[in-house]
Amino acid sequence: MPTLETVDLWIQGNVLDRKAWNDSVEKPIALNQANRNLARWYPDEIITDEILAYQAIWELQGMDPALKFQKQGVKSVSEGEDRIDYLERDKVAPDVRQILGVPAFELVEDEPVILEGGRLL
């Protein structure tokens, strides 16, 4: 089971862009949130220090005020002639998606089930 100490050691030895992690005082909360999300999105996978580290950093990078606009559905912000357009940010860290593949919430089929004949008991 990954801990704050083991994840921190993995990040310090393996991640170049760790500014969001190093600057945060919310590391335990980021790990809890990342662990909770990963358990929901990848219920059959073992969550390693590496996977938890990538997702926790991704969660902390999401604290950026510009990314908060995306969560609220803002498509663009403009001031005078300056305009910033926002694309939707993936919930899953790109490295996690590369390692574990498609998360469970994307595998759910929205197709209705067609029942022909018979009756429900």
Image (cartoon, grey):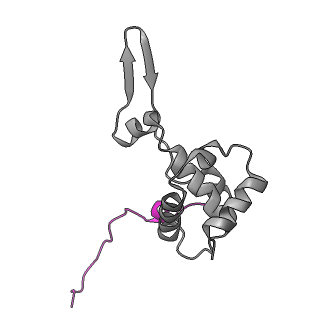
Quarter containing the C terminus: bottom left
What span is in magenta?
Answer: 100-121
Q: Quadrant of the N terminus?
A: bottom right
Residue 90 at x, y = what percent?
51, 47
| Visible residue check, residue 109 | yes
Q: Residue at x 37, y 14 (%)?
A: 79
Residue 100 visible in the current orientation:
no
Residue at left offset 53%, top offset 48%? 60
Task: Please name whichever residue, 89 or 47, is drawn nearer the observer in this view of the structure.
Answer: 47
Name the side, left or right, on which 14 lies relative to 78. Answer: right
Residue 7 magenta-highlighted: no
* Residue 67 horizontal/vertical position (percent): 45, 38
Please say if 120 is above or below 77: below
Point out residue 15 in the picture as x, y percentages from the top left corner.
73, 50
Q: Residue at x 32, y 66 (%)?
A: 112
Most extreme residue toward the front, as rendered? 25
